[in-house]
Image (cartoon, helix red, strand yellow):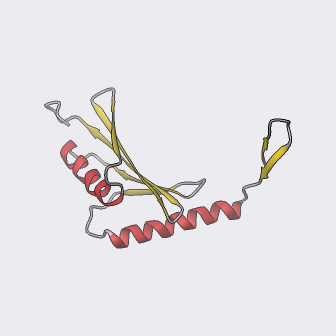
Amino acid sequence: MVQRHGKRGDLVSSTWIGQAERAAWQRRAAAELAAILDAHDDLPLITWTVGPAGSVLVGRVSGLFPAAQAREVFTAWQKRLAPGEAREDRMSGGTTALHATAGSRKEVTVRLTATVQDDEDGDL
């Protein structure tokens, strides 16, 4: 149970999130994934994860793609679901993490991620 208190210590709200609500979140995210895949069946396949809390859906470009191919796949999905919302975080070891948030689609937060390794010549 989560309780939040106002300035004087008064109970403002009390919430219990049960199994049924969590299952509804996952069903909502799974339905949105089906809609996304139906609408974008021309895009390359990526890994999708339905989150365990809240209606969250994460698409990941995974595998050992060459850097250019991983970027291309990420960009194709990002342009369709989250145009203009991407960012890059340079990490150690010659790795860049790509992120995009498509926002809320039918009460489901959709995010895209990719990890891109530098090519042998150091280019992304």
Q: Using residue 27 as the reference point, say whether residue 92 is left or right of it.
A: left
Image point (54%, 54%), residue name: 51
Q: Using residue 63 as the reference point, say whether residue 11 is left or right of it.
A: right
Image point (33%, 26%), residue name: 92
The image shows residue 71 at horizontal and vertical percentages of 24, 47
Q: Quadrant of the C terminus?
A: top left
Spot the residue most to the top: 92
**As displayed, is residue 45 above or below residue 117?**
below
Image point (85%, 37%), residue name: 9
Q: How many marks?
A: 0
Q: Using residue 13 as the reference point, say whether residue 32 is left or right of it.
A: left
Q: Using residue 104 as the reference point, say whether residue 8 is left or right of it.
A: right
**Front-lying residue, 64 or 18:** 18
User: In which quadrant of the rendered view does residue 96 lie?
Assistant: top left
**As displayed, is residue 102 above or below residue 122?**
below
User: In which quadrant of the rendered view does residue 119 lie?
Assistant: top left
**As displayed, is residue 91 above or below residue 5?**
above
Spot the residue most to the left: 121
**Front-lying residue, 9 or 95:** 9
The image shows residue 76 at horizontal and vertical percentages of 26, 56
The image shows residue 4 at horizontal and vertical percentages of 77, 42
Image point (35%, 59%), residue name: 81
The image shows residue 112 at horizontal and vertical percentages of 38, 51
